[in-house]
């Protein structure tokens, strides 16, 4: 079981002090988290001051041991990591200190479904195992672990968002192990210099920055390389081009730097790709875990629409409906409400639509139908069905025009 405790902004209580309080209470009350649902007001803080210092308590999983992580959200702005190249200042990455207020609730908003495979749980297990092996000093030459994760699949399925949320979640889970986390999002397009043979050097300069960050062993460093195929282009394909040398130098430099990072136990590389056939196989082979991220299945689409509708109800745009809040994916098929039948049609109609479009559809529902809130749930569902049909027609037309 994981217990994640977020400190209130401005509190003077330290994470170590509050973790000791939680561990003491849990020892005296081993069934404290068995209550369903658990309410923060029911936690027996030994001092009211501690209660005021806690913003939220979240519980994940069950059973023993109970792992308590105490953290606060960093409110500092993201900053650009820059290098100098021939008199030019080039932004090569964006740096975010974790856990960040900018990524709050991101992990919980990500909904995936892949048959019986819990993708989010698999990714958490991968991260936790990577850090476990690092902490135990497992020889990476004996048992290979490069701490490189590759997410691949069609565009719009949430691969980048998943990486950002994963970095945030792991920085929270390991708040007791590391003082803070860093998410370095690489600007891959900036690494290609207009000067011949400079791109490989740019990659080297990027990893020099990364190594400087990783020298602080109290920091957990995540590197996100989005659309990695733009850096790790298959060398065989590059050799068939008119000027392959620079692309090959970039790939060679990237692979060399990744190999050298294995000695940094506090660095994890996350990469995403829409075009796996374009990635050099040597990079793919270095990825410990290669996870396909596809379009949301029907249950995932239900959860996405359900979350969006609940948000619109909470904010008063849709008139709250008790019948809606009593539903779940397993039960809504059997209900006779008109909105349930329309919802089922919406779920079938939205098959093979990316998650980011699914979350945009409630907004487009109002755009296409010019509705003024508050509106009835039945009216919204009918309009949502129309918006899905319209979006599919537009997407189909644009695909035909671009092929």
Image (spheres, rainbow, N blue to C red):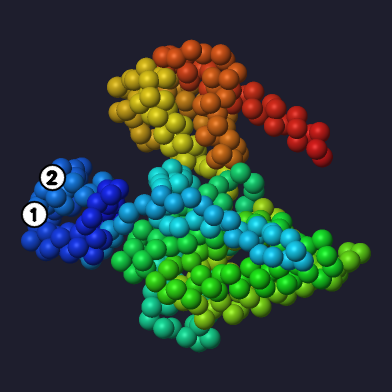
Residue indicated by mark 2 = 42
**Is residue 186 toward the left or the right of residue 248 in the image?**
left
Provide residue 40's location: percent of width, then percent of height.
19, 45
Provide residue 169's location: percent of width, then percent of height.
40, 56
Nearest to the observer: residue 233 or residue 340: 233
**Residue 221 shows in this picture:** yes
Q: Residue at x 51, y 13 (%)?
A: 371
Provide residue 293's location: percent of width, then percent of height.
56, 52
Mark closer to the observer (1, 2): 1
Vertically, is 349 above or below 368? Answer: below
Which element is circle 2 on?
Answer: helix
**Is residue 207 toward the left or the right of residue 114 in the image?**
right
Nearest to the observer: residue 118 or residue 387: 387
Which element is circle 1 on?
Answer: loop
Q: Residues within 10 Å of mark 1 (few under 14, many from 20)?
A: few
Nearest to the observer: residue 25 or residue 73: 73
Provide residue 362's location: percent of width, then percent of height.
51, 26
Which residue occupies the extreme right position in the image?
A: 242
Vertically, is 212 above or below 368? Answer: below
Residue 260 falls in image quadrant: bottom right
Vertically, is 204 above or below 173? Answer: below
Numbered label attached to residue 202: none
Q: Residue at x 75, y 32 (%)?
A: 398
Residue indicated by mark 1 = 46
């Amino acid at each position: 079981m994981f217990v994640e405790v977020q400190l209130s902004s401005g509190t003077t209580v330290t994470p170590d002090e509050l973790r000791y309080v939680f561990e003491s209470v849990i020892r005296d009350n081993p069934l404290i988290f068995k209550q369903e649902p658990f309410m923060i007001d029911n936690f027996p803080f030994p001092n009211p001051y501690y209660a005021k210092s806690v913003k939220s308590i979240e519980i994940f999983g069950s059973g023993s041991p109970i792992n308590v992580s105490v953290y606060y959200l960093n409110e500092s702005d993201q900053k650009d990591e820059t290098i100098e190249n021939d008199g030019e200042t080039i932004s090569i990455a964006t740096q975010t200190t974790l856990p960040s207020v900018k990524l709050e609730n991101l992990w919980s908003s990500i909904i995936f479904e892949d048959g019986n495979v819990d993708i989010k749980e698999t990714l958490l297990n991968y991260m936790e195992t990577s850090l476990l092996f690092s902490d135990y000093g497992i020889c990476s030459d004996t048992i290979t672990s490069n701490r490189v994760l590759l997410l691949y699949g069609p565009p719009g399925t949430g691969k980048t968002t998943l990486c950002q949320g994963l970095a945030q979640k792991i920085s929270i889970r390991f708040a007791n192990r590391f003082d803070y986390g860093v998410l370095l999002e690489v600007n891959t397009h900036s690494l290609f210099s207009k000067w011949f043979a400079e791109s490989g050097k740019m990659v080297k300069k990027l990893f020099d920055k990364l190594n400087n960050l990783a020298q602080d062993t109290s920091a957990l460093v995540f590197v996100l390389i989005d659309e990695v195929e733009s850096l790790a282009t298959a060398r065989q394909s590059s050799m068939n081009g008119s000027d392959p040398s620079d692309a090959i130098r970039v790939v060679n430099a990237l692979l060399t730097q990744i190999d050298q990072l294995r000695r940094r136990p506090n660095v994890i590389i996350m990469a995403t790709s829409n075009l796996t056939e374009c990635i050099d196989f040597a990079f793919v082979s270095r990825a410990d875990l290669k996870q396909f991220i596809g379009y949301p299945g029907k249950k995932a689409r239900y959860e996405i629409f359900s979350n969006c509708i609940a948000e619109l109800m909470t904010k008063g745009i849709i008139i709250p409906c008790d019948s809606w809040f009593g539903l779940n994916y397993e039960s809504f098929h059997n209900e006779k409400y008109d909105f349930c039948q329309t919802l089922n049609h919406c779920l079938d109609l939205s098959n093979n639509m990316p998650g980011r479009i699914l979350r945009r559809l409630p907004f487009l529902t109002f755009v296409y139908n010019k509705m003024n809130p508050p509106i009835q749930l039945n009216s919204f569902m009918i309009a949502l069905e129309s918006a899905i049909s319209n979006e599919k027609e537009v997407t189909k037309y644009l695909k035909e025009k671009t092929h």
